[in-house]
Image (spheres, rainbow, N blue to C red):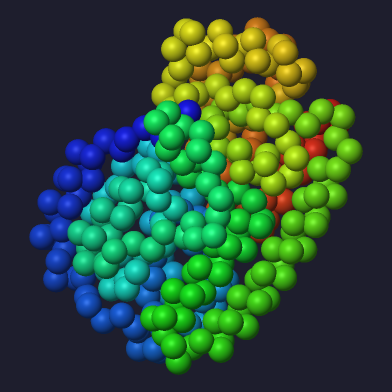
Amino acid sequence: MAVHRRDVSAVAVVLALLWLVAPAIGTTPVDAAGRLRVAASIFPLYDIVRHVAGSAAEVVLVLPPGASPHTFEPTPATVRALAGASVIFVVGHGLDDWAARLARGAGVPDPVRVDRGIRLRRVYAGGGADPHYWLSAPNGKRIATTVAAELERRAPDRGAEIQRALAAYLARLDTADREIRRLLADLPNRRIATVHDAFGYFADAYGLEVAAAFEAFPGREPGPRFVVEFQRKIRASGVGMVFTEPQLSVAALRPIARDLGVTLGVLDPLGGLPGREGYVELLLWDARAVAAAARGVTP
């Protein structure tokens, strides 16, 4: 599945409106308390950054919780929120390029992609990388380490504080990783089916198999041939549930699931919603959902 291109017209309109908000966009990289002002494109990065930064930085989230980076339409308010940020942390690989463009328009320097040290899955047409690499605790640790290095570079006087916060957060991620592995041990069926192919890294990290994905492009209804192949894979896999996402419509999937005799559950790739108000909580929430579905119980 390839991540489809953003509709750049909406971004272009917002950037054209920057002239109207330019006086509000400052250039000072720190606030009155000596904190950096930084931004993150999506909630998982935002939560990682704020835990690693601690009191050394104010962190701005660009994509509102509940919205999808694949379908989000930015507004002038989105740009104003970036005012004065010294850097924006992004996933890259087509998922949040729109956020990087908005940031540049708001005077934020080149974005920092957080995939350093992460082995990317080359699964998309043309050899493109799967951008959902934050969806495993080991990759979360790599992201946190990249963020810490960038924050230290920009605020060397807060280096010791950032390193203490990083160490504490890495320990939390280690604990979460062990709990996820415990939750997903000895499942009767290690196959999952999803509305779109966002959980490959999660599956690879925890010994699962993504047997089928409904949408070839997030937020776009699949064509007839893709639906037929999806149905074939579901029947062959033995899964009893297809996981949707809170950020995407399930209108097209619901009647197909009914015909297949499978139920619809929820896996969340982004979080920031009740029950997964943090990145660690998000990973655990998804693991519990997979475990419950495999065992045929209500999470």
**228 relative position to 292: left or right:** left
**139 relative position to 153: left or right:** right
In the displayed structure, 10 sits above or below 190; it is below
The answer to which quarter of the image holds residue 100 is: bottom left
Instruction: Give coordinates of residue 293: x percent, y percent.
Output: 78, 31
Q: Nearest the camera: 149 or 275?
A: 149
Quarter of the picture containing the C terminus is: top right
Q: Residue at x 61, y 75 (%)?
A: 166
**289 relative position to 225: left or right:** right
Q: Is residue 135 visible?
A: yes
| Count of numbered marks | 0
The answer to which quarter of the image holds residue 54 is: bottom right
Q: Nearest the camera: 158 or 115?
A: 115
Q: Is residue 2 visible?
A: no
Instruction: Give coordinates of residue 90: x percent, y percent.
Output: 41, 57
**113 relative position to 253: left or right:** left
Instruction: Give coordinates of residue 238: x percent, y percent.
Output: 77, 18
Instruction: Give coordinates of residue 57: x percent, y percent.
Output: 45, 78
The answer to which quarter of the image holds residue 253 is: top right
Q: Residue at x 21, y 67 (%)?
A: 107
Q: Residue at x 61, y 38 (%)?
A: 200
Q: Looking at this rendering, what residue extends furthest in the bottom direction?
A: 157
